[in-house]
Every structure is written in structure tokens, then in C-alpha cells.
Image (tube, coloured by chain):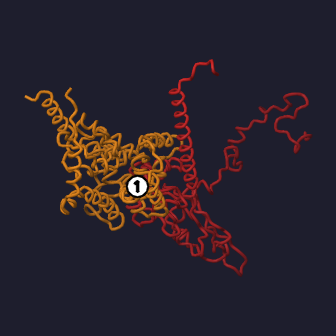
Chain colours: A orange, B red
Amino acid sequence: MSTPPAYPRSAALDSIEKLHARTLPARLWSWRYLVLRRLTQFGVLLLFFGTAHWGWEAAKGVPLLNGNLSASELAGVLPMTDPFAALQIFLAGHVLHTESLLGAAIVLGFYALVGGRVFCAWVCPVNAVTDLAGWLRQHLPVSTLFSLPRGIRYFVLAAALILSVIAGVAAFEWVSPIGMLQRGLIYGMGLGFLSLIAIFLFDLLILKNGWCGHLCPLGAFWSLVGKVALLRVRFDKTSCTHCGECARVCPEPQVLNLKKLERTGWVVSGECSNCGRCTALCPEDSLNFDLRPLIRARHAATLAKAANPH
Amino acid sequence: MAERAPGNPQRRDFLVKLAQGAAFAATGGLLWEYILRNEARASPFALRPPGALAEADFNAACIKCGQCVNVCPPDILRLQPAGGKLPIGMPFYEPRSGACIMCPDIPCMKACPTGALSPELKRIEDARMGLAVIDIENCLSYQGLRCEICHRECPLKGRAITLETHPRQTSKHAMFIPLVHSNACTGCGICEKACPTEIAAIRILPHALVQGKIGEHYRYGWRDTGEITQDFKPSAAPAAPAKPGEAAPGMDYLNAGEP
């Protein structure tokens, strides 16, 4: 094993300097994934809303995107079901019909390709609320109140499944602020906005990335799916200067553990939501979206080259 | 204590952590469970779309997607927003503002992906969304007025709602009393919507809230005479008390002492 490469502090400072010296177009360009994420988040909801209220149709008499994020049907042919909701309903004691099972398989397959928590960063509307809270928190002098292990979400996930059995209803679906928001925007909000205010204040003042990064069981579910995802963030250790800017903007900074990244060559953790903050920001272009098999091949080649330079 | 070997502090820490984690899970779980039960408690009052499973099964099966709401031709279905009277997110209708028009092809049921609206419902006439109940103190017909709007509007007129004529003294016309028959009423609510009183005098309620049950032990003696005389064999009944001093079976203070 060769000695670990040294990361001179000057190189890291140069990197940060590079970030600060960016031109305005370069700054705007680094927001590209943020803009795309907001577009998909609200675009999906708009498709649901337009179908529900303005009669948007794929063909005559065929609703365009009928339903909501829990379950829907695209153009009358493609069923989609939230697999976590389907799992809870199954545990609550109902045998789902073929359409919803097929829909769950389709959605599960899609996110297994693009990354489980792509749902969180690119589709879930609560993400816009928590991103706003996170951004404000960075710019306000909010001190840390307490810390909570991020793994707690997996216990919330387990609790949701166990309670579904005990209570005989889909435990998370009945209290989900995600459901309240997305259903509320399409079918009428009622008092659902209160839970969003609660999440906003929780994330802003009580716990940084509190909801999405610690508690949300749906995020935990997609984290587990994300472990096998195809689309991942590749890490290039030769160009990285350890400036740490990526971890500063990352809502799940534990996935950017540089020691681990150097060993694996990519972000392994399913908790990465492929939001693209780090890839767009990295001043050395060390982080990029790539497909897992390609990353593996590349990483193996680099390792071989390092072991045998000639 | 001094002579005993010091305990394993790591083990102690682990056990305390374990207890803390368990307590955390228990408090959170109990609170969550309470919210769920509280939320589900409101559901006996809900009127669900045609084909809906029985209350507890429907609560378990509905994924709250709103596809039934979107395809409903008269647009009467709504999903309950958070903090309302009914459990969150599930479809319901209020007949006074929008009654089910009983589409023969049942599009809401067909749109349901989970089977919460069961495809076992083949004919809309077999739907049992609720049962029409008449408040006879406020029904115009029961006051002797000619109304019968519910009867006339009923899609299953003559089966779900019939009229019963009650002749009165010569100076007054007969009363035409609407009667609801649970074996035909689907609970569509067109009667409730059409009822002309300020607050509807005929209303749709879930069966469980209004329907009684006679019970197996009652016999319609005037209807099934033959069977009953065959079933009941007085000769087979023990005539004497089982033990001395005890009353014979079927004897109580009302008939004790009679021969």
C-alpha cells in the first residue's frame, strides 16, 4: 500500500478561492440541478393538478396523469404506485390488486435505476420546504440545539411497518406530511399546511435537515432502495483537494466521507439523493454523475494503474 | 460493594442505551398509534364510493390516490383534507351537495388501483353506500302534505322507495308516505339532495349507524307455521325439574305454579 497522498491546505484554499471568484454565469450554471429539481417537483404536481381540475387528457377520454404521488395512472396505460404505501397496505391486511402491485414494481424499478432518494430530491414537494429551511438556516445565526443520529429514520421506517400491522391501517400514509402536502395541493389542503409549518420550523430552528435527513421513513425506504441504484456520484481522488465545499452544501454530508470515497471511488450510501448540489459546485470537478458499472471499471483501472505505474 | 469486582461499564452503557432506545420507540410508537386510532374513529360516519369494502377493510386498503375522485362524472367525490371530520385522505361524498348518479359502468370503482373499491360489484344497483333514513317529524309527506319528491326522484323508484297510502277522514286527502327498503336502496343520496325541506328530512347514513338486526332466535310464527311446529317438540322438552327444588326449564315467576 502506498502512503496516502498529502492534501496541502494551500490547494484546498485555492479551490475555495476558485469558487468565490466564479463569474455570474458560472454561478448560475452551478444552480442547474436545483432549477431542474424544482421543475420536476412542480411539473409532476402540475400534471396531477391539470388532470384533476383542467381535464388534461393523453387522448380523447384518457386522463393524462390520473391520481397523485401515492398511486396514479399515466395515459391510461402505465400504473404507478408508491411501493412504501403498498407495503404498508399489505401489512395492514389488504391484498392489493394487480394494478397497484404492477405500479409498485414499476416505480421501484425506476428508482433502482436513477437512485432511490431521487424521489426525495427531485419529486417530493416537501423537499422544497426543507430546502428553503436549510438554506435560511445557513444564512441565519442558528446554533445547534441537539444532535440526533441520522439512522433514526430506519427505526421510524420499522415503526411504520409494525404499526401498520397493529393498527390495521397504513401507518405512515395516515399521518404523512408528504401526503398532506401533495394531496392537499391537488385535492384541497385543509389543515395540512400546519404540518408543513411544523417541518419548516423544525428544520430551521430545531434540527438541521431534521425531517428529510433524520426522521422521514419514506426517505429511509428510498435510502434502502438506493443502495442498489445504477446512477451514482463518482469521486475522482486525483483532482480532489479536500476543500470540503461539497460536504458543506450536502444535506446528507455523511455520504461524502472522503476517506470512504477514496476507497470506493463513488458515493455508496443510499442516503445520497442525487440532488446534484456537490457535482455542480465542486471547483475541481471531482464529483460527477455516472453509472455504477462504469464507475467500477474506471475505479479498478485507476487502482491497477496506481499499483503498477508502468 | 468494595470487595465485588467492578461491573463492566461498557455493558452497563449498552444496557442503558438499549433501555433508552426502547423507551424512545415505545413513547413514539404509542403516540403514533393513538393518532391513528383517533383518526380512524371518525370513519363510521363516512359515505364511501360504490363498491367500497367494509369500513375497517376500506381503511386498510385505500391508498388515498384520488383516481376515483378524478373520474367521477358528476364530480361529487372528494378526498378528505387533513384536520377534517373524516379520516385523512380518503374519498367520500355528501349527498346534500352532490349525490351519486349511479353510473352503470361504475367508473370510480374501475379507477381504483388497490381494490378498496371492490371490482366484485358488478351492477351499480347492488352498491350499498348507505341507507336512506326518513325523519318522520319533518318529512312533509308525514305531515299529510303531498310531496313524495324523494319517491319520484329515486333512481330505483318503487323498489328502494315506495309510497304507502293512508286514507284519512273525508275532509283530508290521503297521506302518501314514503318508505325506504334496505334491500334495494343503494344510498346514492338523490332523495337527500332533492328533499325540499330546509334541512333534508331524508338522509343517507352508513348502514352500521341505522340498521338493526332481528336476530336468529325470533320466528315469524304467522309465516312459517309448519316448520316451527315441526322444530318444536314439546314432548322432547324436559318437563320435570332437573333436581328437586329447582324450577323446571322455561319456568319463571310469570308461569310458576301454573299447571
Left or right, A7 with reference to A217: left
Q: Residue furthest left?
A: A310
Left or right, A233 with reference to B177: left
**Vertical comparison of A265 with B111: above or below:** above
Tell me where residue B201 sits by quadrant: bottom right
**Between residues A79 and B119, which one lies in front from this camera angle?**
A79
Left or right, A105 with reference to B44: left
**Vertical comparison of B189 with A205: above or below:** below
Look at the image and tell me whether residue B76 can be seen: yes
The quadrant of the image that shows the N terminus of chain B is: top right
Task: Locate residue A181, reporting x and y percent.
Answer: 42, 59
**Between residues B37 and B118, which one lies in front from this camera angle?**
B37
**Between residues A93 and A280, which one lies in front from this camera angle?**
A280
Task: Locate residue B20, reporting x and y percent.
Answer: 54, 37
Task: Locate residue B80, reporting x and y percent.
Answer: 48, 60
Q: Which residue is mark 1?
A: B65
**Vertical comparison of A133 with A262: above or below:** below
The quadrant of the image that shows the C terminus of chain B is: top right
Left or right, B128 with reference to A142: right
Could you tell me the amino acid type at mark 1?
Cys
Circle 1 crowding by C-alpha within 10 Å: few under 14, some 14–19, many from 20? many
Q: Please report, as a chain letter, where disc 1 is located.
A: B
Look at the image and tell me whether residue A68 can be seen: no
Task: Locate residue B44, reporting x and y percent.
Answer: 57, 55
User: Which type of secondary structure does the marked residue at label 1 adopt?
Assistant: loop
